[in-house]
Image (cartoon, rainbow, N blue to C red):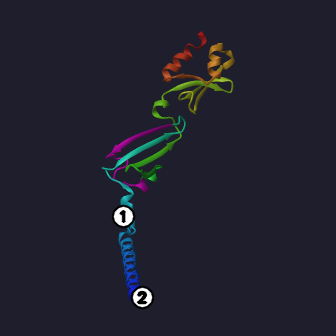
Amino acid sequence: MRKHTLSKMISFLLVVFIILTAALTAQVYISNNNSTPEASPAAQEEIRSISKQTQVRKEIYYSQCHHLISEIITGDTEFADRSFAEIENEGWSVFWADDGKVVAFRELDDLCPDDAVKRHLGIYQGNVAIYAGPSDCDGKLIEALDIKVESLYPGWQEMLTSGGIDFANEEELLSALENLDEF
């Protein structure tokens, strides 16, 4: 009886060993056959190019006004049929986003198109000065006027010292400057 039990136990262990060996061999085979071979340089370049059907999210960050302008374009001739490397050589950062779109990003030390037409009066070395963009931007100095801030009406002095006076465009600014001595 003991011999029979020992024989059954050895048979059982042998079957378990064979099953485990087969499972391990199958797992190794599946892992080796599912691995992706390295893409050739030509295939990598194809993946890193933009076709006319590729959706591109074109993003430009304007550092002077801190605005990001983003638009989705397809079939655009600026990027279509070009490699990422070509576009990157023109100052863009190009990458695939998680949403399946290509992102072309660029930062410009400038004002966005909406803010570029705006003007504001500020102070430069104690004088009234004209700056590009609204007063909450880092717009460039256009012109320092020969008008001392202290010679202005107190209301204007206060507005200038508390951040500046904004104008929608150059015409509004010029109109205000013409009437500056009336206040």
Q: Position of residue 112 (x, y in %)?
A: 48, 35
Give the vertical position of 122 relative to 52 (above or below). Answer: above
Residue numbers of the magenta segment: 67-86
Residue name at image x 49 percent, y 30 percent: 115
Q: Amino acid at mark 1?
A: Ala
Residue closer to the observer: 178 or 149: 149
Residue closer to the observer: 37 or 178: 37
Q: Is residue 75 magenta?
A: yes
Q: Amino acid at mark 2?
A: Arg
Labels in figure, total: 2
**Viewport quadrant of the C terminus:** top right
Q: Which residue is mark 2?
A: 2
Give the vertical position of 115 relative to 39 (above or below). Answer: above
Residue 113: image tag: none
Give the vertical position of 95 relative to 8 (above or below). Answer: above
Q: Is residue 57 magenta?
A: no
Q: Nearer the viewer, mark 2 or mark 1?
A: 2
The secondary element bearing badge 1 is classed as helix
Badge 1: residue crowd in 10 Å (few <14, some 14–19, many ≥20): few
Q: Position of residue 30 (x, y in %)?
A: 36, 72
**Viewport quadrant of the N terminus:** bottom left
Q: Which residue is mark 1?
A: 43
Q: Position of residue 29 (x, y in %)?
A: 36, 75
